[in-house]
Each structure stands twice: as structure tokens, then as C-alpha cells.
Image (tube, coloured by chain):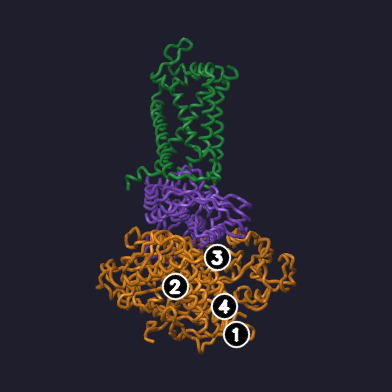
Chain colours: A orange, B purple, C green
Amino acid sequence: MTKLDAKIPEGPLAEKWTKYKANAKLVNPANRKKLDIIMVGTGLAGSGAASSLGEMGYNVKAFCFQDTPRRAHSVAAQGGINASKNYKNDGDSDYRLFYDMIKGGDYRSREANVYRAAEVSNATIDQLTAQGVPFAREYGGTLDNRSFGGVQVSRTFYAKGQTGQQCLLGVYSGISRQIKAGTVTMYPRRDILDIVVIDGKARGVIARNLVTGEIERHSAHAVVLATGGYGTVYYLSTLAVNSNASAAWSAYKRGAFFANPSFIQIHPTSIPVLNDYQAKLTLMSESLRNDGRIWVPLKKGDKRHPADIPEAERDYYLERRYPAFGNLVPRDVASRAAKERCDAGYGVGETGLAVNLDFKDAIAKQGKAAIENKYGNLFEMYEKITGMNPYEQPMRIYPAGHYTMGGLWVDYDLMTTVPGLFAIGESNFSDHGANRLGASSLMQCAGDGLFILPYTISNYLADEIKTPRYSTELPEFDEAEKSAQDKLNKLLAINGTETATSFHKRLGKILWDYSGMSRNEEGLKKGLKLVEELKAEFWQKLRIPGGEAEINQELEKAGRIADFFEIAKLIITDGLNRNESCGAHFREESQTETGEAKRDDKNYAYVAAWEYQGDDKAPKLHKEALNYEYVEVKERSYK
Amino acid sequence: MKVKLKIWRQKNAKAKGKFVDYDLDEVSTEMSFLEMLDALNDKLIRRGEEPVAFEHDCREGICGSCSLYINGQPHGPEQKTTTCELHMRSFKDGATIVIEPFRAKAFPIMKDLIVDRNAFDKIISAGGFISINAGSAQDANSILVKKENADEAMNSASCIGCGACVAACKNASAMLFVSAKVSQFALLEQGKVEAKERVQAMVAKMDELGFGNCTNTYACEAECPKGISVENIARMNREFLSAKLT
Amino acid sequence: MSYQNAFSSITKKVTTAIAGLFLIMFLMVHLGINLFILPITENHQEMFAAAAHFMGTNWIVKVFEIVLMGAILIHVILGFILQFQNWAARGQQQYKVRSRSTTSFMSRYIIYTGIMILLFLAVHFYNFYFIKLGLVAAPDIANIAHPQEEHFYELAVYLFTNEIGYSVLYIVSFIFLGIHLNHAFQSAFQTLGLNHKKYTPAIKIIGNLYSIIIPIGYMMIPLYFMIYG
């Protein structure tokens, strides 16, 4: 188990990061420009890191599949970004934020990393503000905060309902500045097909130019993955349609361990599926639950218009089941409760897979203007998509795949088990345990990129200053390019009858049914079998029109879906292994008499890190024990 | 419902393009416009033809990937709506829908409906930033910004960089895009330090890249899916003049 | 970079706008004098002649005349340069479906109304200004061998009463001027950066009124002669 050393610095929790920074090895400014860093993905974490590293003088090559860094899916985060500034004087502190995250993550995250995430949150707000992110302000000119996701303090900074977009544009301006300065070279419209490992260290990538189809080789002294999560594996999710896990997956195949893949957050308030061709689900901000009341009819299959159902015939099930938190229970709890009602036949809408989120009472009490002021743009968006007016009838909502807490295993340095290969932002597993709290993903991405990686990667690169630039003619590059090329050739050669999307849709359905909000051994095993079967069918029946040396969106899609099959298997394998309910992972075998999640700390208080053994071999499990020194492990109750 | 589609097809940047007609039945009013195109592509692939290439990503109106000039309007007939948010209920049964790429000399077509909007990145790189290194920022609340200005800056900042303004403008001018960024920073205290250099550098880059000149027709504002106001253009003109004259 | 900036799109537009605003001012002065062609006072004829004489001899006005010619040239030349750049920027391949964007007709066709006004100006110069400069011979009217600016009254009356075509051209041209001004007035303020939530609506109203009242003022003169001439 020597491979799973998290390298957590000694000393008290609050001093670990300070101590680390004081002792970390540094690279002389004159040497930095001789060191190349490849940044894969240019979202909030990737662009932030690339700009920070560029400012320090490193030579950064940044890659993204979009046409520009500004379109990364960080753009879609709505609600806000947390920081322990305590501007509201309501008792917030680094420790409080740390504690909330540990508890919210259902005690499945690493204390030292989480504390550091909380610690750097303030510097992130300072930096983003200074970069011109127009966070909301009070009349006195200071920054405003709002409360979020059921915590007891107001620590969320926000920019209307577009916080993610604004934070991303902030770091996008940062990376743009470094592009002008010449420290960052941008390679947009590139898919990363493989990671090149030489003598055990990550030394480069194989990229496909999505415009010309050309396969490119790029070498560097270190490779950073900032590629986001793998939530699109569900096909219908709140993620961008093109978000994918292929780069992370190739890292896994090259020896990086994959941690807690089954920890996937299902967001409770998404617009439900409207038609068979639906390509994605749109999130409605969690903040709506502050004023909206969730209900379903008391009578099964009651298809009356919601306005015609009297109060006495409505079941406000969250208020009924969780009187203390009511409609504001955490995401995982709210999602499962909605599924429970719909599965029991009480769902609304044509499909029966939706519940009502009703603003009638809030409008009556606060007035339409007040509600419009708070949620106007969300209501507008809802009406655009559904054609229904939420001021007049309840919104229909249903849970949807949203965020992956699992990801590449990293140590305190944010380095994977492959030396020189780092993972930051959503692509790593480190900070959110089994469930993520609202407004903490932007916080983690920005913190990882702007303030943590620059120190930890320098610590690594300090030993690399004598390493010359690697030639891309080395046999390792030949081998990686060949394997990438082989996969493309294989995909193009199938020449079957089915579209890539149709397979993705079916894969998503299998995962949703057997490894979604609620899981059991039998279902997981069945799911695994179905994924295997579908994968075999995919490799026989796929059809990709067009060729390789051109823009070929179907080829891009197919390559990503091919990897999703593998990742789906790993998700299920991990879910099968973890026979406990924690956070977003709910195993029906492990629940209380009232149907609440039951954690098994005795047997599962560990991070499950999976090691690749070959495409058709079961992965090997490594366990990183989670020892809580500063937090008392308790039951999470919202009753 | 049924629709008749006339879609611009072009093999690559150098090839000559043309309109191709497609009939699509079994379109549901619940479908988004892009889902309708997905359905068309599904049909095309099964027929052994090449699908229509178009850009899209978040499909919730925030990333700015989607474009399309639909029946004479960027992002189609609905106001303040991106193509991905547009739904088929906005069209009549049997309607003919002409779909063209965003056209402008500065936005060369790459394939079918995909255009290269990289020019926008070049403009931002020229000066669309505040020069502050990570680690050197002071406490966020040490910079006070009037709420009114912060809100105004937020409105300007909500630009998604889709390029509809350029596509809509008869002059293919990028003034709305550039001015939104110039305004955002000009309105914030943090951005004032290098305001003069910024506006001059960004305008120079915009001119260099071959965008047209603004003749104040305000087509950009009318078609902007985020409702960015032409007041930003006036503000940029003001900023530019004061930078030149002082 | 400084070279490029000196002739940046905004510099060109601002210069065009300033020249345009100067022309807008001049239109008012010119109209003020022209109105004396109409019998608005008993001695309107002498008043007109005096004004014309003043305009032709006063040295301050002479200076302004040069400025005015400069403004016209700048406005026209820059207008064309900007327009050619704009056509180039649109690219070779045109949209199949014409824009359905909600923009005003006046703003879309500003270059064409401008060209019409320019054509009129050529005729107008030929009929008046070039005579004054001695570049062209004046028509023989009312036994005046060499008409000067003090004879512009007789010239105007001659044109409006004897040449119906001129009157029609004159009226049509001022309709184009009205359309041009309607967009140009508020557009100039926008280009100069003078857009403000509080004042812009007022500027738009003033611009609309100006673009109606001034051309009507000019048109009254040929109309008078067409009706009473």
C-alpha cells in the first residue's frame, strides 16, 4: 500500500498548509521558463492554474476541446461560491466551512485537503474580485453574501444567477493575459487521447486536432488534468453535452488510481425529461427551495391540474418526512425522496417522473414582485424550456445527474499515483466526500487552480530543473500515438447501423436505473452485465459517417462514449463494493427502518481507489483509510 | 409537426457551400431547436449521410457555443433566447426554416454551420483583463464599488461571447462584444487603473481583425440573447475618446 | 500601434459625427436665411440680400466657410471609407434570408440617403455656390449679367418658378435629408459617447423633431412658389 501515501503534512490541522508552503521546494524564476507544463482543460480550475503558473513564469501549454476557454462548463454553476470571510459577522471561520464540508460529505473526505480548501477560499474571493468579477454588492459598496444549501451562516458570494460564468470569465481574462504575455500557449479544439508516461513519470499527451484530425504529440515536465467530472456518463445530466472523461480515463489506464467513482451527486431540482430526443437536463438553482414548496398529490395517478387539487389532497412529503429542515434538506436526501414518491406512483406530468415545486404560498405572502426579484431569470428560463409559467402553476422538477465527487485519486500535492500527473478541480476526488454542498465546487476549482497547484507543482518541478525538454520522437510517444490511432481506426472501421448517441442514451438509462439515486446488489450486478452487453453491441453496430482528417463530431462523440462504457463499469464496481449508504451513494441494503441512509463507518470509512488491470479485467481496490482527528464522526440527520 | 429545412452545407473552410433541403416529420413542439437538429442528424446517419455539423455544449444558454442564423435572425425568432433555448413551439407546423451559419469576414466558416470565433479571444487577449497576479490581491472588501456600478458591470459582464451581435450587424461590427467587456471593467474601481490602455488595445485589435464599424443600427442589441445594451458602446466610445484626448 | 489608433474605427466615426453635428448646425443657419425668400416680413427681400451679402463678405463667415467645406468633405470621405470597410467586413457570402432584426429603416439606409443628399449638393453647388465662386456662369435672368450672392434671391425665385424639375428634386432631396437626419442626430450623440438613461430619450425626441422641422422648413420655399408662383 505504499502507493497510497496521501503525504499529509505533520502538525495541527490549521497549520498544515502554512507549514507545507514554508517547507515546499521552490523553482528559481530563471529556471521556470525552461519547465513546460501541460494543462488539460481550461475551466475554472484549469484556466486559473494556467494563469497562475504563467504569472510565475512557467511555460504552459493549455488544451481544451472547446473553441475557447470561456465555454468550459464551469460557466453553468449558478448559485455562488463559498468563502469563510465572515463578512456577515455570523460566526463563520475556516474551521466552520471545513466542518460543514466534512459533514455534508458524510465523513468520506480527507480532513487535511478539505481544511486547506476552506483556508484558501478567502484568497480566491480576493483574487477574483480584483480580476473584475462583478460579485453582488451591498449599498455601502462591500460584497454581499447569501445563505445556501442549509448551512447556518451566509458565506456565499454570487453574481446574479451566473456566478460560475463570472468566475470562469475572471480566470479566462487571466489566461488571456498570459497568452498575450507568451507564457501560456492555447491549443483549443483538441481532444486529449492519451497521456504519455516515460520512466514512470507523466511527460506528455497525445492530442487530436478536432479541425484537421491530425494527431499531435506534446511533451512537458508535468501534466495537469483539469477535465471536470464524468457526469455525462448518464447521458441526461445537467452537464454540458460534450463534457467527457476521456483524458481522465486515459490517465487511469496509464496508472492513475480512480477514487470513489460511485459518488455521483444527483441534483434534486432539474427540469424533467420532456421528450425522447432530449439531449440534456437543465438545472433550476437549489436556491428555489428557499421559497418553493415541494409536493405531489395524495392520490395515486391524480392527473388534475395542480390548481384544482385542494390543500388537503396534497402531500408535502419533504415537510412531512423532515420537519426540521423541510424543503431545505441536502441534495441527496431531497433527490431520493422525490424518486421514492414517483416510484410509488405519485409523480406528476405526462411521464409521472416529476414533482411540483410550488411558489403559490410564497407569492401570496411576499408578492409577485419579490419573487420575481429573487428568481426572475430562473422563472424565465423555465418558461422558455417548458412553455409553462411558474407564476401561475407549480414548476415540475425531477432529480438529474449533476456532479461527480469521485475522480482521480490525488495526494495532498494534488498529484495522482503517476508522478508528474496532477488532477485539479472536479476531476480529482479530494474535497467533497460522498456528497457536495452547494457553492463549494467553484470554491474548490478556483482554489486548486489559483492557489494550491502552483505550490505543489513547484515542489515537484524543483527536482526536474535539470530534465531537458523531452523529444516527442521517443518510443513512448510512438506507442501512445499508435494506441490512440488504433482506437480511432477501430471505431471508424465498425461501419454498423447505430448512432453513437443512441448507445449513449441506452448506457445512461442502464446507469440511471441500476446505479442512480438508489442502488442494490442485484441491480448493480444486472447493470454491470447490461453495460457489458451494450459495450459489445457498440463495438459491432456503431456507425460513424465521414472520415478522420476533418471535423467529425460523430467520431469525437464515439471516442468519448467508448470510454464511458469503461467508466460505467467502474462506477458500478465501486457501488457494489461499498455496501453502505453514504451521501449520494444509497445502498438499499443499508438503510434505517424509516428508509434513511445508514453509514457503515466500521467497514467503509475509507477512500476506494481503483487500479487499472486491463480492459477486461476487474480493477484492483486500494484503500486509503480515513482517520478523523479533528471532527467527531456523527450520524447525519435532518429530521 | 413537420418542418422543411434549408441548411447551409459546406464540407470545410475552403469548399464552396450550398443550401440543402431536408424534410423532417415527427417533430415534437417540446423539442428544442438543437434537439430537432439532433433528430435530423440521427436520420442522416442512419441513411449513411454526413450529419450537419453545428456547435453546441451547455444547452442551457450560458456557454455561448451555439449560434445559427435562423430565418434571418441570429438565435432565431425569440427575444433574449439562445438557439439551444429555442423550442419548436416557436414555429408553425409545416414551416420552412432556413438555417445559415453566423456570417462575417472575421468569422470564417469551418464546416457546415460551424464558424471560427477565435477573433473574440484575440480581442480579449489584447487587453480584456485586469493585470493582477494571483496572490497580490488585497482583501476583497478593501475595494468599494457602488452597488449601482456593480450591477451595471454585471449586466455588461453577462455577455456569453456567442457572436450574435456580429452576425446580426449589417457591418459585422464587434462593437457590442468589445464594449461589454470594456464597460464591465470601466465601471469597477479595480478596472480603472489600466482603463486607457485597455480600451485602446482592444479597439485596435478589433479593427485589425476585420470587423466592421458601428453605424448605430442597434441590430446587435435587438439580437443579443443576453440583452446587452448599446449603452455599452457609447461608454466605450467615451472611454476611447478620453483615453485618446488625455 | 499608435498609427493604427490614430485612424481607428472609433476615431473615424467620432470625426464623422463631429463633422455631421457641425453640418446639422449649419442647416439651421442656412434655413434661417433661406426663409427670407418667403414673404415673412415686408422687407424680406432686402433682409435676404443683406444676409447673403454678410455671409459672402464677413471674414469670420469666410473662415467658417472653409470649415464648412472641410466638414462636408470629411463627412463624405470618412462616410465612404467606413462604408467600404463595412461591406468588406460582412464577407463575400451574403445571407440568404435578409435580416429580420428590429432596426430602423433610417439607420439601415443611412449610406444611401447620404448619397442622395450628396447628389443634391452637387446640383445645389452648381446652381449657387459655384456661381458665387465664379466657376460657372449664371443663367441670364432679370438682366443681371454676373449674379453674385446678393442676387441669390432672384436666382432662387428663377429656379423655383421656371424649373419645376428643380423644385421636385429639391423637395425629394429634403425628404432624404429628413430620413438621414432622423438617424444621424441621435447616432452622433451615441458615437460621441453621449448616451445616458436620463438624457438619451430627450435627445431622440429632439432628433426626431429636428429631422422633421428642418426639412419641412426648406421644403416650404419651393412649395410656396409652386402654389403661389
Q: Which mark is residue A280?
A: 3
Give the distance between the C-alpha atoms of the residues marked 4 and 2, in whole angstroms.
24 Å
Q: Which mark is residue A427?
A: 2
Pointer 1: what residue?
A: A591
Secondary element at tag 2: helix
Secondary element at tag 4: helix
Give the mark nearer the N terminus: 1 vs 3. 3
Pointer 4: what residue?
A: A514
Amino acid found under the numbered disc labelled 2 = Ser
Chain letter for mark 2, please.
Answer: A
Name the spot of residue A227 as percent of width and height, x first.
43, 69
Amino acid found under the numbered disc labelled 3 = Lys
Give the mark nearer the N terminus: 3 vs 4. 3
Give the distance between the C-alpha atoms of the residues marked 1 and 3, in whole angstroms.
31 Å
In the image, residue B60 sits, relative to residue A419, either above or below, namely above
Give the mark nearer the N terminus: 1 vs 4. 4
Q: Nearer the viewer, mark 1 or mark 4?
A: 4
Residue at the (60%, 53%) spot, across then down: B3
Amino acid found under the numbered disc labelled 1 = Gln
Label 1 Cα neighbours within 10 Å, binned few <14 / some 14-19 / many ≥20:
some
Name the spot of residue B227 as percent of width and height, x first.
53, 53
